[in-house]
Amino acid sequence: MKKEFFESDIGESYVKATLDSGLQIFILEKPLYKSAYALFGTKYGSIDTAFSVDGVKTEVPEGIAHFLEHKLFESEDGDAFTKFAKTGAYANAFTSFDKTCYLFSCSDNFYENLDILLDFVQSPYFTKETVEKEQGIIGQEIRMYDDSPGWRVMFNMLMSMYHNHPVRIDIAGTVESIAKIDYNLLFRCYNTFYNPSNMFICIAGNVDTDTCLKQIGENIKPSKTIELTRITAEEPYNVVENYTEQALEVAQPMFCFGFKEEYKGEISLKEKIVTSLLLGIISGEASPLYRDLTNKGLINDEFDTEHFCGNGYSALLFEGESKDPKAVADAIKHEINRLKNEGIDRKLFSAVRAGMYGSAIRLFNNVESIAMQLTDCAMNGYGLFDEIKYLKSVTVEDVMKKLGSLDTENTVLSVINPK
Amino acid sequence: MSAKLFNLAEGVEGLFVKNDRFNTTLISYNFYLPLKKETVAPYALLPFILTSCGKDYPDFSKLNLKLAKLYGARLNASAEKYGDYQLLKMTISVINDRFSLDGESLVKSASQLLLNLIFSPNTEDGAFLTEDLEREKRKAIEHIKGEISEKRIYAKKRLIEEIYENSPYGIPKCGTVEDVEAITETSLYNAWIRMLESAFVRVQVVGSAVPAGLFEDITERFSVTERKNITDCKISEPTEKRNTVKRVTDNMDVTQGKLCLGFSAEMCGNDDTTLPLMVMTDIFGGGPYSKLFSNVREKMSLCYYCSASAVRQKGLITVESGIETENALKAEKEILNQLEAVKKGEFSDFEFQSSIKSISDSLNSYNDSQNSIDLWYAIKINNDSVYSPEDIAKKLKNITREDVVNTANGVTLNTVYKLLPEGAK
């Protein structure tokens, strides 16, 4: 086992350990806390639909990662929820575009819960019957999202932005794609992506690092290391279409306005920080644009921005509700062009940066936020304290450079109109 | 960890919850007022307008810039129903001084900022400014109208309105669109004066220390206010029993339906005497071990979600579920069957113990979240002593199976609300 220790002047420290099997473990102790949060994840999400293992290429139906998440809670000796019920822990799981995570939080019986987590994620159990039953349940879940305007506005945007990248498909897949999932496919994906070399464990809270490491080391099942390659579809630079709309039961239009960016390989933490700063400067709550849009009655407190990025995709998103989404989109483009010409207000830059520094400090208040941040570290190879460090050194010029790369023509406006 | 109560003025309490584990300090102002149709909308608008600008920051954008400079201090406002009372809440949370990069006293600045916003709003000649009023009214109206977008939340809101059609708890928490439209610059100013004069007030600090001078400043601000008709936050009216179950169905262009049931319980209050109601509701429809989840959702696949929760102040239990239209009747029948099972004591020791353990585990985690601590104490205002979450977790161990059965036998169906696709009945 390889063990590294990281310490920061904000009074926090953590351990990163790598087992011989390749499993990565991150632990941050919070001795003053009563509770703890643990997460067992795999770098396997909805976009991993094409891959090769030891040179053999495979393509699988959309929605398998999420399907597996549902099935893993079942074991031969009863489901994981029942086991957690005996200890009182809160347990859950989620699948995103690039990962699947199983988690629990508790204030008592931590090590007993850790045992349950380690066991059920490593013990897949499904039969032809249980797979068929799950197809019905997930089909309902997919249809539930059809009524959710917030979900639809986002995925309609992604469908209009991406030609081929699987990020354009719903995380749960489609009713048609999940019908193609069977017992054999599930096992093949499990054996590929649930290999310890592709997995990580993140823990934060009132725990003892050495006890955790010992327990994890003793309970990770031996496995053969595999050579896994993700195959990313060729994605053109341009969006599919600039505008898409749908009518649903909403009171006023909802919108998601996205700037597609050229993907030039893995996005560094520094670039993510610069992009967040830029979003704050363009339309954060202290920005002139936010004031104008609010005063014109074009946005409300639902307005938000996001740097949406992962393996093979990157986009800047502006989302919210508005009586006139096209006017909002035009105003955002106009503001970007204005900033390109006039430059960035240094006072606003400093304030937005101070705000981000505060948020980075605030994150250490909450064991769940810490564990989620450690998950980001595991997925992307960052250090937990890198953000605070970079924030102190980032400059207006870094942000100006990023601003210059925005293409105000390569955008998608997705709108949900009232029926 | 300890909670210490101070008397700051007539009907104005300060509460300090000492907790050294956080990197931030949280200051929260809570104003309690009676829930009334005539006053609900202007009162509900107050926390939002007061935290959007003020005498020192007439432009909301400048205020947002100040908050960013205070390392992203967070100013939050809400107006919620607390039983038959309205709870107006304004909070500020800021990172502690030791993290400041330029040596500024962040906690003191944030504390002063919120104090000034609440007591020195941007008004002229007994009226709020038209521009500020119109901005906040528009946002409030858009928020009320927008509730329809999230069908799960909307269905629950409609259920509550139907159960309490003639009593305060049925009033929407921010009023109706018409109520908001009727607010004027002067009527809002008068509501602000009435809030300062008559609300029961609790100012809470969660962190390492009370910001220097804060409680003294509050005493001083209230010394120039004539405190009168102060809200007496006694126990709310219990939920009445209906002889005939009320049934309401709304139709909308949706693919899936929602089924919500409201029950009257005999037990009502906000202190430890309602613990059996908490446990009973959890066994019925709380965690994954509950009757509703394990049977109605998992075994019978009648709902894609199905859970129960209790509003203890009102002695109310609600069940929320998502259904395919053709399963509506079957699902309702099965939900009621599960309640019958609890009434007959047909729940295993596993279900009972799981429930106690789950509630107790969650109570014991409260002190790890500043917001949870604040919410916990903010709804403990008329008790003789202030219980901590751990105190309640300890008391849970005394709850017996008989307590659960007795509580369940006092529960009766009040209202069934359905939100179904167009044309479905």
Image: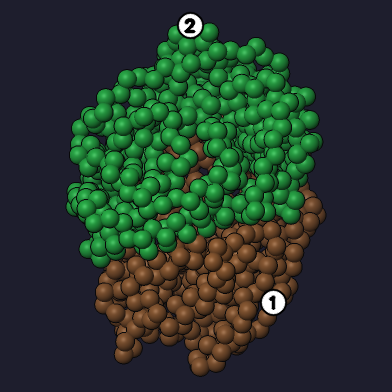
Chain colours: A green, B brown
- When the figure is inspected, residue B338 is found, relative to residue A200, above or below; the finding is below
Can you see residue B341? Answer: no
Can you see residue A282? Answer: yes
Residue B188: quarter of image: bottom left
Tag 2 residue: A56
| Residue at (77, 30) in percent of width and height | A215
Tag 1 residue: B5
The three-letter amino acid code for the residue at tag 2 is: Val
Circle 2 residues within 10 Å: few <14, some 14–19, many ≥20:
few
| Residue at (56, 78) in percent of width and height | B201
Q: Quadrant of the N terminus of chain A?
A: top right
Q: Residue furthest top?
A: A56
Query: CB atoms at circles 2 and 1 under 8 Å apart?
Result: no
| Residue at (35, 30) in percent of width and height | A263
| Residue at (64, 49) in percent of width and height | A8
Q: What kind of element bears circle 2?
A: strand
Q: Nearer the viewer, mark 2 or mark 1?
A: 2
Chain letter of mark 2 equals: A
Q: Which mark is residue A372?
A: none
The answer as to whether the residues below labels 2 and 1 share one chain is no
Residue A79: quarter of image: top right
Relative to B282, A307 lies left or right: left
Q: What kind of element bears circle 1?
A: strand
Out of B145 and B218, give the one closest to the viewer. B218
The three-letter amino acid code for the residue at tag 1 is: Leu
Rendered location of residue B359, percent (x, y):
69, 49
- When the figure is inspected, residue B77 is found, relative to residue A324, above or below; the finding is below
Circle 1 residues within 10 Å: few <14, some 14–19, many ≥20:
some
Out of A5 and B119, give the one closest to the viewer. A5
Chain letter of mark 1 equals: B
Rendered location of residue B200, percent (x, y):
56, 80
Rendered location of residue B387, percent (x, y):
72, 66
